[in-house]
Image (tube, rainbow, N blue to C red):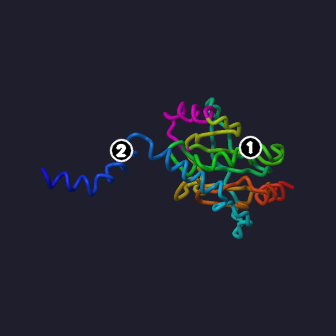
């Protein structure tokens, strides 16, 4: 018994990790920490044009949070800011306020936002609640079946900027701060 107390005294702090994880506090703590990193400017988006300029495959459908299906080819000829995220992803949640500010700042006639939640279909109410609680006004969608191979990304968040001529002008895997003057200019220049 004395030995167990000694082990708990020495390593008891390790119990904090599973408690944080199973209580859901770990996810919130990660989001807060990552948000601080974004706000400090350590991970601002680097808007350099994608050099391979691959043609984007518009051949898939998405659905809005009301369940209405949308053929993604509807966005051909427009500049598209496409962000893949999920409610369970702390880095995704951390970057979303910067995307909201970017959305508010750009001309929505020239730049279309598609916030594509990769939550499972049965989680649609959770997605709706999350978006409402955070007062996000950008358009949120979910996949409607198959997504193009280009959207089979290794991790989220992943962001694409698709130019009006259908090329992938920008692709970023990982959390970034998109609400910068440099990134706004990048979007505006592509949308011309």
Residue 174 versus residue 26 in the image, above or below: below
Residue marked by disc 1: 74
Binning the other alpha carbons within 10 Å of mark 1 as few (below 14), some (14 to 19) or many (20 upward) gives few
Secondary structure at badge 2 equals: helix
Near-viewer residue (54 or 46): 46
Q: Is residue 101 left or right of residue 117?
A: right
Residue marked by disc 2: 19
Near-viewer residue (24 or 70): 24
Q: Is residue 179 left or right of residue 21?
A: right
Q: Horizontal and vertical percent for residue 69? A: 64, 35
Residue reaching furthest to the right: 192
- Tell me the residue at 70%/61% (across/down): 170
Q: Give the mark, 1 or 2, whose residue is nearer the N terminus.
A: 2
Q: Horizontal and vertical percent for residue 7? A: 21, 56
Q: Horizontal and vertical percent for residue 11? A: 28, 56
- Residue 76 covered by magenta stretch: no
In space, the residues marked 1 and 2 are separated at their CA atoms by: 46 Å
The range drawn in magenta is 118-133
Residue 3 versus residue 134 in the image, above or below: below
Q: Horizontal and vertical percent for residue 185? A: 82, 58
- Tell me the residue at 60%/53% (across/down): 36
């Amino acid at each position: 018994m004395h030995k167990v107390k000694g082990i708990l005294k020495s390593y008891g702090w390790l119990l904090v990790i599973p408690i944080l994880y199973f209580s859901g506090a770990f996810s919130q703590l990660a989001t807060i920490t990552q948000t601080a990193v974004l706000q400090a400017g350590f991970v601002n988006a680097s808007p350099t044009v994608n050099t391979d300029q691959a043609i984007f495959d518009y051949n898939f459908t998405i659905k809005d949070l009301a369940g209405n299906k949308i053929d993604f080819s509807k966005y051909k000829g427009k500049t598209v800011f496409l962000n893949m995220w999920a409610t369970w992803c702390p880095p995704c949640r951390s970057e979303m306020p910067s995307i909201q500010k970017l959305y508010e700042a750009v001309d929505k006639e020239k730049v279309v936002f598609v916030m594509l939640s990769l939550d499972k279909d049965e989680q649609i109410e959770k997605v709706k609640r999350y978006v409402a609680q955070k007062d996000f006004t950008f358009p949120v969608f979910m996949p409607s079946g198959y997504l193009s191979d280009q959207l089979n990304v290794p991790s989220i968040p992943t962001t694409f900027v698709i130019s009006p001529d259908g090329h992938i002008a920008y692709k970023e895997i990982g959390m970034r701060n998109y609400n910068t003057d440099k990134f706004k200019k990048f979007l505006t220049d592509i949308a011309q």
